[in-house]
Amino acid sequence: MAKITLETRRAAYDEILESLGARYRQVLDELSYGPASARELAMRLWQKGSIPSPERNFVHPRLTELEQVELVSVIDKKPCPISGKTVAIYERVTKETHLKAMQGELALEPKEADHG
């Protein structure tokens, strides 16, 4: 059962990546260079001409949605140099990391009782 679960998770991960819209893909591509806050990502994308302004609201909703489908994770927090508020630092979840996490979760699941 664990092998099947890993296979279906792997397939789901691939399907999600293939179905991503442009903004999601841009956010993931930027995170492939390393962890960043929403504001840092927005600044980078704005400098590349991918979004109309460096406002974090252009990327933050995508980060939240990518986190929900386990393609991005919050790994740390730090003070924002502009607002002074504590902000989340996001990291792209690689396929390998995703699968390792799934293997760890499966190892923690209780075994089915042997009714033999």
Image (cartoon, rainbow, N blue to C red):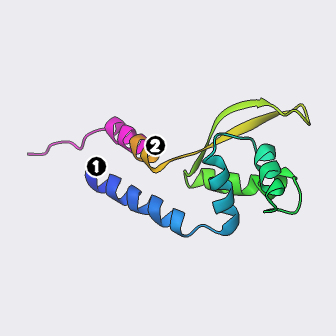
Between residues 19 and 5, which one lies in front from this camera angle? Answer: 19
Calculate the distance from the C-alpha at mark 2 to the C-alpha at mark 1.
Answer: 17 Å
SS at badge 1: helix
Q: Position of residue 64 (x, y in %)?
A: 68, 52
**Total of numbered circles in the picture?**
2
Q: Residue beneath label 1, please?
A: 2
Q: Residue furthest front?
A: 48
Q: Position of residue 21 (x, y in %)?
A: 64, 69
Is 88 contained in the magenta span?
no
Of circles 2 and 1, which is in front?
Answer: 2
| Rendered image: mark on residue 32 | none
The residue at 47%/66% (across/down) is: 15
Give the residue type at disc 2.
Thr
Q: Are marks 2 and 1 in contact (CB under 8 Å)?
A: no
Q: Position of residue 17 (x, y in %)?
A: 53, 63
The quarter of the picture where the C terminus appears is top left
Q: Residue beneath label 2, please?
A: 97
Would residue 60 be seen by someone viewing this image from the given angle?
yes
Position of residue 64 in the picture relative to residue 53 (left or right): left
Q: Which residues are magenta?
A: 101-116
Position of residue 16 in the picture relative to residue 78 (left or right): left
